[in-house]
Image (spheres, rainbow, N blue to C red):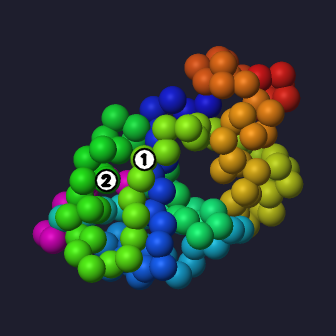
Amino acid sequence: MLEDRGVLAVGGPDRASFLQGLVSNDTTQISAERAIYAALLTAQGKYLHDFMLAEVGETIWLDGEAARLADLKRRLSLFRLRAKVTIDERPDLTVAAVVGNTAFGLPSEPGAASLAMALPLSIRGWPNSARGSSCRASNLAGC
C-alpha cells in the first residue's frame, strides 16, 4: 500500500474535456483498461503536480501525492468556471502498487489498468488494517 498517495475524483459530463485543457497528456486515451501519467504545469511550463489518471465508471480518478492533494484540488477548482464537473477527495480509497504483468490479470502493454485495483479495500475484502502493513506481492491475499 502506498500511504503517501491519495485519490482525487473528477466527475461530471465535462470531466474529460475539462482535464484535457489542463494536464500535460491526452485525456482521450484514458479508459477503464488504460491509465495515463500526466502533470499539472504553470502557464510557463513549471511543474506543480504529477499523477496517474484512470477512468472508473463516470469518474476520472487522479492518483497523486497525498500530502499535496488538497492543493491539486484547489488548483483544478480555479479553472472549473462553467464546466460541469465535480472534484472530490476520496480518503476512502487506498493506492497500491503491483509489480509484474500477471498481477490481477493485467495485459502486458504499458498503461494497462484494472478496475479491481481501483476499488476501495473493504469492497475487495482487504481489511483497512492492510494500510501500512508490509505486504509482499506473493502474499497479497494475506494482507
Give the mark, 1 or 2, whose residue is nearer the N terminus.
Answer: 2
Q: Where residue 135 sits: x, y (%)?
A: 72, 23
Work out which quarter of the rendered image holds the N terminus and state it.
top right
Q: Residues within 10 Å of mark 2 (few under 14, many from 20)?
A: some
Residue identifier under label 2:
73
Which amino acid does the dot numbered 2 rest on?
Lys
Which contiguous range is marked in magenta?
43-50
Q: Is residue 105 left or right of residue 20?
A: right
Regarding residue 125, the answer to whether it shows in the image is: yes
Task: Confirm or deny contact between disc 1 and disc 2 (CB under 8 A).
Answer: yes
In percent of the image, x 13 and y 69: which residue is there?
A: 44
Q: Is residue 41 left or right of residue 125?
A: left
Which amino acid does the dot numbered 1 rest on?
Glu
Q: Which mark is residue 89?
A: 1
Which sits in the foreground, 39 or 54?
54
The secondary structure type at the circle numbered 1 is strand
